[in-house]
Image: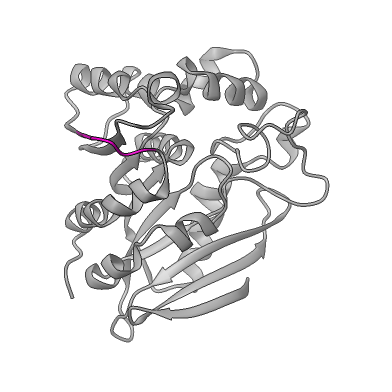
């Protein structure tokens, strides 16, 4: 693991790191904020998964999470959204919603994407091992959150790993990729045309099939240009209601899909995670 940069912020260290990934067969870059802490202390970890077109840098530079993480004693980890580099295939038309920057947090089974697009394994196995081995992380206290495509990733990963993650939340998540254009394109391209294989990467389908979490927090802007066609939070609400999963769905009047929206409510989400991770104000 190579340190790309390190900057002091709110008494902690915001670092960016690079390593050769066995999962993707490429170099991968990620960011980690470690808050101020007592020597020898182990801190809870919040994972943040980003959306389409993003890298680790979007939330790192625009998310405004460090003050809250410093106050609450939370490590904040932000991976990239896809493999990158020479030989990594992209969308044939270079569209933004598939290929580079759009890994959808799945392990692709369809060539040529199956060779490098293994973001599920990267985020759930390889990177956690790297975090555990190199940072003061208490891996018994993890939670996960994300935005848009990353909200989809956070929900599906938490639903399939209920014993690992003590909390899950999302901003503007793609809740039912099997029912919307973004998801249909990505899941078909990475996993093939068998829609039964998609269900393990669809939060609404996972809940319908019996997956459970103790509760969910979702914030969604009412002025989000993707709300009606791509995000469809009403489908998540219906699934949670049917499964008796407590869902806090905040429809935020006038907010859009951008980091102006995310940064406005980021501290609320981090406090929600801290309460479930046994963290607190320093």
Residue at 67 percent across and 40 percent down: it is 117
Q: Is residue 157 above or below residue 57?
A: above
Q: Is residue 58 above or below residue 220?
A: below
> Which one is nearer the viewer's eye here, 209 or 31?
31
Residue farthest toward the bottom in the current orientation of the protein: 39
**Residue 144 seen in render:** no
Give x and y (percent) for residue 101: 62, 43
Q: Quadrant of residue 98?
A: top right
Give x and y (percent) for residue 262: 35, 48
Colour pattern of the rendering: one colour
Residue 198 falls left or right of residue 35: right
Residue at 68 percent across and 54 percent down: it is 22
Q: Quadrant of residue 110?
A: top right
> Which one is nearer the viewer's eye here, 64 or 278?
64
- Residue 69 in the magenta stretch? The answer is no
Which image quarter is the N terminus in? bottom right
Which image quarter is the C terminus in? bottom left
- Residue 250 in the magenta stretch? The answer is yes
Q: Quadrant of residue 184?
A: top right
Residue at 50 percent across and 70 percent down: it is 133
Q: Is residue 110 above or below residue 44?
A: above
Give x and y (percent) for residue 36: 32, 80
Q: What residue range appears in magenta? A: 249-256
Give x and y (percent) for residue 220: 30, 35
Residue at 65 percent across and 49 percent down: it is 23
**Residue 166 seen in render:** yes
Image mark count = 0
Residue 266 falls left or right of residue 56: left
Residue 206 falls left or right of residue 49: left
Residue farthest toward the front in the current orientation of the protein: 254
């Amino acid at each position: 693991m190579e340190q790309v940069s390190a900057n002091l912020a709110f008494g902690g260290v915001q670092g960016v790191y690079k390593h050769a990934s066995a999962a993707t067969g490429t170099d991968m870059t990620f960011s980690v904020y470690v808050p101020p802490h007592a020597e020898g202390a182990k801190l809870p970890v919040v994972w943040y998964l980003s959306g389409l077109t993003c890298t680790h840098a979007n939330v790192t530079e625009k998310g405004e999470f460090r003050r809250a993480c410093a106050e609450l004693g939370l490590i904040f980890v932000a991976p990239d959204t896809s493999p990158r580099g020479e030989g990594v295939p992209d969308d044939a038309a270079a569209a933004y919603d598939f290929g580079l920057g759009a890994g959808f947090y799945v392990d692709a089974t369809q060539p040529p994407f199956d060779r490098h697009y293994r973001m599920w394994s990267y985020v759930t196995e390889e990177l956690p091992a790297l975090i555990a081995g190199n940072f003061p992380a208490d891996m018994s206290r993890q939670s996960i959150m994300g935005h848009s495509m990353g909200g989809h990733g956070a929900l599906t990963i938490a639903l399939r790993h209920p014993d690992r993650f003590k909390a899950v939340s999302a901003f503007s998540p793609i809740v039912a990729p099997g029912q919307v254009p973004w998801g249909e394109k990505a899941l078909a391209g990475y996993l093939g045309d068998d829609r039964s294989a998609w269900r393990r990467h669809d939060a609404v389908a996972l809940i319908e099939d019996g997956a459970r979490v103790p509760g969910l927090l979702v914030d969604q802007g009412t002025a989000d240009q993707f709300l009606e066609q791509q995000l469809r939070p009403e489908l998540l609400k219906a699934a949670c209601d049917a499964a008796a999963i407590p869902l806090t769905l905040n429809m935020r009047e006038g907010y859009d899909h951008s980091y102006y929206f995310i940064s406005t409510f980021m501290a609320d989400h981090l406090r929600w995670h801290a309460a479930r991770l046994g963290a607190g104000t320093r």
